[in-house]
Amino acid sequence: MINSVEQLKNTLEDSLLKENINTNLSKTERILSIAGGTYIALKGLRNIFSHPLIAATELTLGYTLLNRGVSGYCAISEKLEHEPKGPEPVLVAENL
């Protein structure tokens, strides 16, 4: 059991979790996105005939999470990283 978990970990690190210039997610975020996206997409496939609108939403969300995890890039994370953390400093000069 432990050997198969180690083998899966090595496979993920060697193929899916390689970093490139656009990667802005950690490995943990990527693994969670892949796992969550897979679960949600499979749930959507299961519900495709009973609840088509919900299934389409689940498939879209699942695909988006899978894409985020495999590519390692998230536009929202990039936008949040580049925004200032607080108000801009203001220089106040008084003439006496």
Image (cartoon, grey):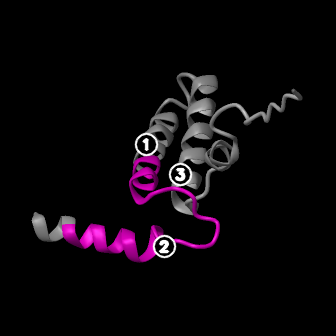
Task: Describe the element under mark 1 as helix, strand or loop.
Answer: helix
**Residue drawn at the location 53% of the way across and 61% of the way down:** 70
Marked residue nearer the N-terminal end (3 or 2): 2
Task: Describe the element under mark 3 as helix, strand or loop.
Answer: helix
Give the left or right position of residue 83, taking residue 55 as reference: right
- Report which residue position mark 3 lands on: 66
In the displayed structure, would residue 88 be above or below residue 20?
A: above
**Residue drawn at the location 47% of the way across and 38% of the way down:** 40
Q: Compare residues 82 and 9 and report the one nearer the observer.
A: 82
Prevailing secondary structure of the magenta residues: helix
Measure the alpha-carbon separation of dots 3 and 1: 8 Å
Q: Residues within 10 Å of mark 1 (few under 14, many from 20)?
A: some
For residue 43: magenta? no
Asked whether the beta carbons under mark 2 and mark 1 sit within 8 Å of each other, the answer is no
Q: Compare residues 79 and 64 and report the one nearer the observer.
A: 79
Q: What quarter of the picture does the C terminus occupy? A: top right
Give the left or right position of residue 95, taking residue 63 as reference: right
For residue 18: magenta? yes
Image coordinates of residue 44 in percent, x first then y, are 51, 35
Q: What quarter of the picture does the N terminus occupy? A: bottom left
Image coordinates of residue 15 in percent, x first then y, are 45, 75
Measure the alpha-carbon separation of dots 3 and 2: 15 Å
In the displayed structure, would residue 95 be above or below residue 38?
A: above
Question: Residue 42 falls in which quadrant of the image?
Answer: top left
Instruction: Residue type at mark 1: give it.
Output: Gly
Q: Residues within 10 Å of mark 3 (few under 14, many from 20)?
A: many
In the displayed structure, would residue 16 be above or below residue 78?
A: below
